[in-house]
Amino acid sequence: MDIALEQVEYRYQANTPFERLALKNIDLVIPSKRFIAVIGHTGSGKSTLLQHLNALLQPTKGRVLIGDQLIDSEKKEKNLRKVRQKVGIVFQFPEHQLFEETVEKDICFGPMNFGVKKDEAKRRARELIRQVGLPEDVLDKSPFDLSGGQMRRVAIAGVLAMEPDVLVLDEPTAGLDPRGRKEVMEMFYRLHQEKGLSTILVTHSMEDAAIYADEIVIMHQGEIKRKGTPKEIFSDPKELLSLGLNVPDVVNFQYLLERKMSQKLGKTCLSIEELSSALKDWKIRGERS
């Protein structure tokens, strides 16, 4: 399902003395089945943008097209059930939203609330608990008896049980150690590919943006500063640093190395393997010259 934002502006507490402009001049197309990363420093508008993707917020100017449903600033849309079902959001610390007495009931709550029969909801729970890397016997346990990482996976299964076409991830690895972060991101990427999802990742991790995204969107002071592939975005570390952003460790190492050598390797490397290969090629070229 495609999503398009056209000249979107959003103001918090509009028409009050506390009015604050959070988004302006946002034009963005998110094609179906693409993996998009949204990066930017705190206060850049990332989370506000995210909440327009399933109409949790509606624009104060402009319009948002979510599949075939139009959300227009000129008209307050009330029938948003279809949008909320097809665009699932995993917020930071989603485990804080668990509330049912068993894991199975928690996963089943969303789909049953949208009219899915109990037997079908239970089938989805059994399938999804395995897909998020947990054993089926967890379904009978209280979510509050699980570890923090397991609780997060249960909450993610609850979002996936709605069978969304679009998955929006707001810092989904916040608070996890490096191993846990990698496991969760690998899980999301596998689900993205297997289920043909459109995935939008809001993240402070430049490594995750570089590894998983087809396209990266940089937010700055409520506007889209730049869009491009990971190689295009990370090809100029100085620009990102000027916006208060970091770059992946590999990109930073390459940047410092090129400055020290006063030579360019010829391409931006996003992984250790790419950098190793580029250095090998550079060495061979030097030996031949």
Image (cartoon, rainbow, N blue to C red):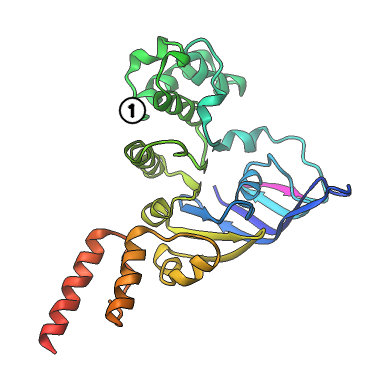
Pointer 1 residue: 133
Relative to the observer, which residue lies in front, 239 or 91?
239
Q: Residue 147, position in %: x, y?
A: 40, 21
Q: Amino acid at mark 1?
A: Gly
Name the outermost residue toward the bottom: 289
Q: Quadrant of the C terminus?
A: bottom left
Vertical position of residue 166 compared to residue 122: above or below: below
In this rendering, position of residue 24 left or right of residue 129: right
Tell me if residue 29 can be seen.
yes
284 with respect to 157 (left or right): left
Q: Residue at x 52, y 36 (%)?
A: 164
Residue pushed farthest left? Answer: 287
Per the rendered image, the range of residues in magenta is: 67-72
Residue 9 within the magenta-colored segment of the rendering: no
Q: Quick one: label 1, few (<14), some, or many (20+) residues within 10 Å? A: some
Pick the residue in front: 139 or 77.
Answer: 139
Q: How many marks?
A: 1
51 is higher (above) or lower (below) than 121: below
- Residue 89 at x, y percent in the picture: 56, 37
- The structure residue drawn at horizontal position 27% and vertical position 79%, both measured from the top left corner, is 261
Vertical position of residue 35 compared to residue 115: above or below = below
Q: Is residue 254 above or below residue 130?
A: below
- Nearest the viewer among 24 and 109 is 24
Residue 183 in picture, x, y percent from top left: 33, 37
Q: Is residue 70 magenta?
A: yes
